[in-house]
Amino acid sequence: MKVTLSALNTSESSFTPLVVIELAQDVKEETKEWLKNRIIAKKKDGGAQLLFRPLLNKYEQETLENQNLYLVGASKIRMLLGAEAVGLVKECNDNTMRAFTYRTRQNFKGFNVRRLLTSGIVIQVFPLHDNEALKKLEDTWYTRFALKYQPIENHRLESAYQNHLILKVLVFNFLNCFASLFYIAFVLKDMKLLRQSLATLLITSQILNQIVESLLPYWLQRKHGVRVKRKMQALKADIDATLYEQVILEKEMGTYLGTFDDYLELFLQFGYVSLFSCVYPLAAAFAVLNNFTEVNSDALKMCRVFKRPFSEPSAHIGVWQLAFETMSVISVVTNCALIGMSPQVNAIFPESKADLVLIVVAVEHALLALKFILAFAIPDKPRHIQIKLARLEFESLEALKQQQMKLVTENLKEEPKESGKEKAT
């Protein structure tokens, strides 16, 4: 038996909420009703065919605090059909990876309908832009400068806009963080001062990032959570208190603005470690230690500080790949130059500096050639992964063809009935 979206029930009064929508205070009742109908209407009527209800207190009433808060969920079948629609891949019983389909759900490993449900997820959706959240994007004058002049370029695609914005911010941050180090290394030629400055900048930036990004927001969130719990105890909301408390608590959480700041932090750390690694080898050890703590602090930030963000599919990291590769090329050049400037190497060529320069340039070119050869020789996707991806694409196309054939067959069956009704009238 084929299950379609039209067979789903959207009138369930109790369900596990997946998304919380908060409307503006001045939204009219007609707009609320229109939004509700668009969410619960069947797919053939242009709706999403989801479950929808307002957030109520223990007396099944809306209060001033939750007047414009609404819960959106989905039935089990709707979620499974959604997984089939987006083409999620799951491991089959024969140890192959295949696109999930509801009709063949029993053929997948560890299939359990209840496990496919997501419990306790609350996500806030705003109909209007949050000005405070947008201001957080402008935490440095570099970003403000880039955003101010970015519309003049008039990019056709959003991806091109973001890529050019990232490049501008990277140039400013590169000059701000590394210009002084280059001056000390190649103008003052003071390796001891360079080592001290590099250690100071690296360790200080790592500590400040950990405090500002995770510990301080987590402390503020804990204080807000205590206030919410006290308020919940005063209201004595004992029936749906857990859900109500979670919605009110996560409603005030900050919005995760994306991976820009995280990538920028990694980029600067990579620069500190790679550009002057021959002068301060201990920088790599500090970077590894910071990465271990960064994993836990990022998990704390995503789970306890910010609202859960919506997932955005992406095939690669975009312009950041070019930024890291450029940094690696510059690192080879700077390290070869610093090694050539060291007293130990200069002692080998006490008379002829030209020979030293030629040898350093030759070694630098050889290392760059080796880097590009390895990058070209090692494929980004292994052979067996390419075969599996090609198989998945072929199976998806075949499934799409079968679905289109079924739709054509159903339409052909309905046409004689309609023509018979017209003749009868």
Image (tube, grey):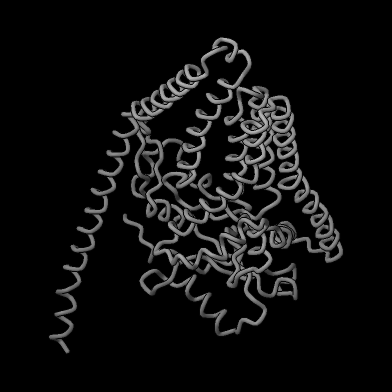
In this rendering, the count of numbered labels is 0
Q: In the displayed image of the protein, which residue is found farthest to the top?
A: 348
Residue 46: percent from the left, percent from the top? 39, 73
Position of 225 relative to 201 (above/below)? below
The residue lying at 69 percent from left, 69 percent from top is 56
- Find residue 288 and report its image quarter: top right
Whether residue 84 is visible here, answered yes or no, is yes
Q: Is residue 372 left or right of residue 277?
A: left
- Find residue 381 and report its image quarter: top left
The residue lying at 41 percent from left, 62 percent from top is 157
Residue 387: percent from the left, percent from the top? 29, 33
- Report the front residue among 307 and 17: 307
Quadrant where the N terminus is found in the figure: bottom left
Position of 369 relative to 424 (above/below)? above
- Find residue 107 and report its image quarter: top left
The residue lying at 18 percent from left, 82 percent from top is 421
The residue lying at 80 percent from left, 57 percent from top is 224
Q: In the displayed image of the protein, which residue is found farthest to the front?
A: 351
Residue 61: percent from the left, percent from the top? 71, 74
Residue 8: percent from the left, percent from the top? 43, 63
Whether residue 15 is visible here, answered yes or no, is no
Q: In the displayed image of the protein, which residue is found farthest to the bottom?
A: 425
- Report the front residue among 384 and 248: 384
Q: Is residue 98 left or right of residue 279?
A: left
- Report the front residue among 98 and 189: 189
Q: In the displayed image of the protein, which residue is found farthest to the left?
A: 423
Quadrant where the C terminus is found in the figure: bottom left
